[in-house]
């Protein structure tokens, strides 16, 4: 979401920082998100996790640890030299789209630990049925398109390219200089 977040920060004239959150997948099905974790360890589990077949806790713990390590490694490669404190400010979380809300919920939890005055969520697209949840976890949720039929974020882009770590670091550096 950094290309979009960078544009938002530039228009608003505010600093740009990053919260890295990764989905936690079911050990038997890497496509099924059962939760999300941030680099600093804020975890959100899906309610669907409770309905999954019995799985030894250590498998979920291993999936959690793997996702967090991935997030930590990415943050280490991205982190700007000086991080900004959102304490007492309106913190705006921007993503390129929200599919399940798991990674956004983990990012909100991590951000709230830094005591902002408010947390706003912004994205170009999210499923309509996810909007009540987004409003529940934030003071404001701004989503441009909320289709009933939602298969994936990428379907709402002509070209949905993954942003590499080097490119992401450039976005952070350019906005904060």
Image (tube, rainbow, N blue to C red):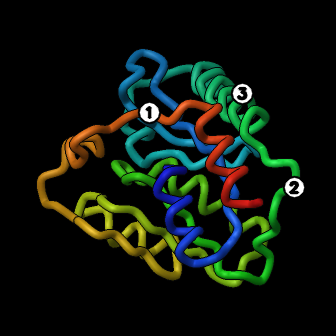
| On screen, residue 132 above or below 74 | below
| On screen, residue 99 above or below 74 | below
Q: Earlier in the sequence, mark 2 or mark 1?
A: 2
Residue 44's mark?
A: none
Quarter of the C terminus within the rendering: bottom right
Q: Give neighbour class at mark 2: few <14, some 14-19, many 20+ (Cα, 10 Å).
A: few
Q: CA distance from mark 2 to mark 1?
A: 25 Å
Q: Position of residue 25 (x, y in %)?
A: 47, 28
Task: Determine which quarter of the picture holds residue 26.
Answer: top left
Task: Determine which quarter of the picture holds residue 176.
Answer: bottom right
Q: CA distance from mark 1 to mark 3?
A: 20 Å
Q: Give neighbour class at mark 1: few <14, some 14-19, many 20+ (Cα, 10 Å).
A: few
Which residue lies at the image location 60% right of the left edge and 55% below the top edge? Answer: 107
Relative depth, front residue between 38 and 2: 2
Q: Position of residue 45 (x, y in %)?
A: 53, 45
Numbered disc in front, either 1 or 3? 1
* Residues at discs 2 and 1 in contact (Cβ within 8 Å): no
Relative depth, front residue between 139 and 13: 13
Q: Earlier in the sequence, mark 2 or mark 3?
A: 3
Residue 82's mark?
A: 2
Indicate the secondary structure of the residue bearing disc 2: loop
Which residue lies at the image location 70% right of the left edge and 57% below the top edge? Answer: 17
* Residues at discs 2 and 3 in contact (Cβ within 8 Å): no
Which residue lies at the image location 39% right of the left edge and 62% below the top edge? Answer: 123
Residue on which the image places disc 3: 69
Q: Position of residue 127 (x, y in %)?
A: 25, 58
Left or right of 89? Residue 164 is left
Indicate the secondary structure of the residue bearing disc 3: helix
Residue on which the image places disc 1: 162
């Amino acid at each position: 979401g950094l290309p979009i977040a960078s544009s938002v920060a530039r228009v608003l004239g505010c600093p740009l920082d990053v919260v890295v959150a990764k989905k936690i997948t079911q050990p038997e099905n890497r496509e099924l998100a059962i939760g999300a974790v941030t680099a600093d360890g804020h975890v959100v589990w899906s309610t669907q996790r409770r309905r999954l077949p019995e799985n030894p806790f250590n498998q979920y713990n291993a999936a959690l640890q793997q996702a967090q390590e991935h997030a930590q490694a990415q943050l280490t490669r991205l982190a700007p030299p000086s991080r900004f404190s959102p304490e007492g400010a309106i913190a705006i979380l921007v993503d390129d789209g929200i599919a399940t809300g798991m990674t956004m919920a983990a990012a909100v939890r991590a951000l709230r630990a830094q005591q902002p005055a408010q947390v706003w969520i912004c994205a170009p697209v999210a499923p309509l049925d996810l909007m009540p949840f987004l409003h529940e976890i934030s003071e404001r949720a701004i989503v441009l398109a909320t289709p009933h039929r939602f298969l994936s974020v990428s379907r709402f882009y002509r070209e949905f390219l993954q942003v590499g770590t080097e490119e992401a670091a450039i976005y952070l550096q350019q906005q904060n200089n």
